[in-house]
Image (cartoon, coloured by chain):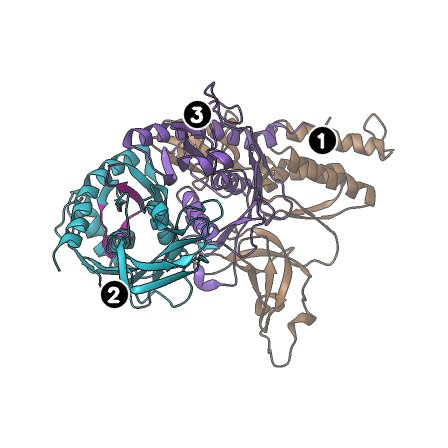
Amino acid sequence: MSSKEARRVLVVPGEVICEGEFKVLSPNYIVKVDGKYVATAIGLAQINDDSRELSFIPLEGCYVPQVDDIVIGYVVDVGLTYWEVDIRAPFTATLYAVDFLGRPVNPAKEDLSSYLSTGDTVIAKVEVFDRSRGPIITTKGKGLGKVIQGTIVEISPVKVARVIGRRGSMHQLLRSETGCDITVARNGRILISCPNKELEDILIMAILKIEREAHIPGLTDRIKEFIIREKVKRGLISGEGKAT
Amino acid sequence: MSVTPSAEITVPKLRSATILSMLKKGLRASGRGLTDFRPIEIVPGYVPNADGSALVKLGNTVVIAGVKLEVGSPYPDTPNEGALVVSAEFMPTASPTFEPGPPDENAIELARVIDRSLREIKAIDMEKLVIVPGRRVWVVYVDIYVLDHDGNLVDASSIAALAALMDTKLPKVEVDELGNVKVDRNSRSGPLQLRHKVVTVSIAKAENVLFVDPDIEEERVCETKLVITVSDDGRIAGMQKSGLGALSVEEVVRATEIALKVSKDLLVIVEKSLTRPT
Amino acid sequence: MGRVKLLREDGLRHDGRKPDELRPIRMQVGVLNKASGSALVEYGATKVLAAVHGPREIPQKHLLLPNRAILRCRYHMLTFSTHERKSPAPSRREIELSKVIREALEPVVMAEVFPRTAIDIFIEVINADGGTRTASVTAASLALADAGIPMRDLVVGVAVGKVDGVLVLDIDEVEDMYGEADMPVAVAPSLGLVTLLQLNGVLTREEFDEALKLALKGAQVIYNIARETLKSRYLGVKVEE
């Protein structure tokens, strides 16, 4: 997408990003007015003068579902043949029982709340989302389904890209430095499962630090140092970075 | 809570495209020019039981305005002035989309725009409405009912309100030694004194074209309206942007020029309708 | 009623301001926890809080539109925000202002991004000292930006008045009450659009042109403060060492 030469500017709605001819990769956040590219939200505009591309990292905003997104949802209502799931989007998502159970259900005989009831957590994939109806999610697939253990960390959905990092670099770093299992869902919910409570605490602090400092360059290095420092503080490793 | 309205009645795209492409060429489906009003018909004294009234037809838009004078107490901050109360109702007769019930935000906005137009310039000589200084004054109720809606309700209502006020005659009153007021509606002491005459001119904007007196179809395709109140001495006596869209600064200035010009003809029409021998 | 003198001998206003001077303006965004976006805006003693919820689904499905989000806006005054207690029942003024404020925001909000949803804007006037509707527009637009809802521009409001024959910027309650005219204006400065325009009072053609210019000048200053306020939330974040 964007090469290393992309310039980044903090902009607010109505602010001119640049002039000229560019390919706009984030049409909701960059509009052309009188030949100038104008930001429509608060965020970081990325200007790539070589590839003539403009993209945008919003710093505020809700989750807008896209097909194939992995999301973590909470069951908020149980119907006769489906569940309603809060995925932090403007619309609640629908999870059909036939999809979740892998077989047809007979609403006259079965009570769906015996499988999933309100408050339960699921990891799912957005299967259908078009302008005609709310999103439909599926739990068919590897790693999808009901969540029975772990901890959920919530961050702003627009900061998810930073927790994943370029080509997954940040996600990789967090995993290798803490030894935790981390599932980053697109809707800003992160499921973590750690070897011990101390590492979990460090990971949560690191994730929230990423959210806070998402717009400040040098994030990956800072997070790496942060985790090492915290581990030293807790005696998990010695000062030289070796495991004790 | 104020909610983005849904298009009550959809104008077919083929139709709206025609209207817009004509407007861009300075033409209108009705054959009118951009600054032409539809024919205006004013019937003063339409409601004999009112103290003043007028039926106004602006093209197919029909509005009736009536004035009732009641003896009341002055406002504490203006003890030696009468009072003015303007209200408006969009009747279910006027459109299949109008529901009976208390006035909605559109009716309230219309009434308040007309209220301010009359109030701010002191169109009515309020000091002439004192019956017992500091205690009893005339309260002027101007009530506007929209009977048939074919667009530009504000201008039709402003013309009706002005005509009704010009038609208003004060009932005779007797005040006894105790300050009690007795009203005799069968005889009149004279006309309501107006210091200024005002009309609104609503300027509609579509495709950067400005035009006056939109009919209902034009209203549905236009982006926004700017209502400008003009007085008989050529001053701007009120303004209100109404509708979803916006105007450039240049368009605001241009709209003002149009309103100042067009308002003169409107005032002449109202004046004529009331001086015509009946 | 004694005539209140609004301009002093030295040409300054009753509170010491120059005719084209704004009151001290303060803005904060993200002041509420549960709202999608929020802002607190003060023009002098006028204090307005705005909160945005959504875009979201609402139970009143019949209100929703297939091609865009609807905006729902309520301008509301707290009962103790005014000198005389304001009745808690919605007044005709509040109903009208809810409409004109919504219509001041409609031109900039990219509602088409969120079809079949509602974006709710709640405006609470905490203290009223003139210019509450224009401060409301500024606060609402900041709250929308804070909620991350795409907008073509920020909208800011300011009122111009005429007192003792002189056009003055950002009138307060006294100047509104005893002055000759009050002209609230809201603009999207980068787009060059006027999105709210009302005139309560009487102006000549020349005065109107002058008043509009004065409003645009004041709006530009408020616009710059609004932009800085939004940015400072991020520029102010210090890297934790």
Mark 1 or 3, nearer chain start: 3
* Mark count: 3
Would residue A39 be visible to someone looking at this image? Answer: no
Q: Position of residue C14 (x, y in %)?
A: 51, 27
User: Dot 3 corresponds to which residue?
Assistant: A49
Residue closest to the far top:
C10
Q: In 3D space, how far apart are the residues under numbered discs 1 and 2 (Cα atoms)?
A: 84 Å
Residue A16 is marked as none
- Between disc 1 and disc 2, the foreground one is 2
Q: Chain of mark 2?
A: B
Residue C231, picture quadrant: top right
Image point 38% across, 28% down: which residue? C165
Mark 1 touching mark 2, by CB under 8 A? no
Please tell me whether mark 3 or mark 2 is closer to you in this view.
Answer: 2
* Amino acid type at mark 1: Lys
Q: Which mark is residue B47?
A: 2
Residue on which disc 1 sits: A224
Q: Crowding near pointer 1: few (<14 within 10 Å), some, many (20+)? A: some
Which residue is nearer to you in this view: A58 or B235?
Answer: B235
Q: Look at 23% across and 54% down and name the residue there.
A: B215
Give the alpha-carbon distance from disc 1 to disc 3, as whole Å.
Answer: 30 Å
Percent of width and height locating residue C197: 37, 40
Chain letter behind tag 3: A
Q: Position of residue A174 (x, y in %)?
A: 70, 38
